[in-house]
Amino acid sequence: MQTITHKINNSTFVEVLSDELVINTIEDGADLLANLYYQGFDGAILYQQNITPTFFDLKTKMAGELLQKASNFRMRVIIIGDFENIESKSLQDFIKESNRGSLVNFVSSLSEVTTPPPS
């Protein structure tokens, strides 16, 4: 696993890069968020392919538990992936609702996160 630091709107985010799963269990996610928080990051940029598919099955409650951990740490979480063709209505609704707020966002590319909006 490697990381890249980004300054976004006066906040420090860490982009987590890996060729394998980084979050396979709730404990993995909680440990990662805690470590990043204690390193002074304001947010984490994660990739869909580095998170177990179980996270995206809302019946498992993994997403809710991990995002509650992020909320406890007051840490933003941005998940980059392909969320356009999701068949689960509940997951579509969850993503739409999350994207209305600022704590957790689902985007399709890093440029959506790091490129400032036009003036």
Image (cartoon, rainbow, N blue to C red):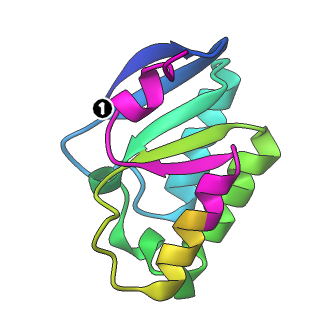
Q: Which residue is mark 1?
A: 1
Residue sitting at x 64%, y 65%: 97
Residue sitting at x 69%, y 47%: 70
Q: The magenta stretch spans which residues?
A: 97-119
Residue sitting at x 58%, y 72%: 94
The foreground one among 29 and 8 is 8
Instruction: Answer whether residue 105 is magenta in the image.
Output: yes
What crowding class fits label 1: few (fewer than 14 Cα within 10 Å), some (14-19), or many (20 or more)? few
Amino acid carrying mark 1 in the image: Met
Residue sitting at x 70%, y 51%: 101
Return the x and y of residue 43 as percentages of the image width and height. 60, 31
Residue that protrudes farthest toward the front in the picture: 119
Q: Is residue 53 above or below residue 110?
A: below
Identify the secondary structure beneath mark 1. loop
The foreground one among 106 and 70 is 106
Return the x and y of residue 113 as percentages of the image width and height. 46, 30
Q: Is residue 86 above or below residue 84?
A: below
Q: Is residue 60 above or below residue 45?
A: below
The C terminus lies in quadrant: top right
**Quarter-wise, where is residue 8 in the image?**
top right
Q: Is residue 5 above or below residue 58?
A: above
Return the x and y of residue 115 as percentages of the image width and height. 42, 21
The foreground one among 25 and 99 is 99
Instruction: Answer whether residue 92 is magenta in the image.
Output: no
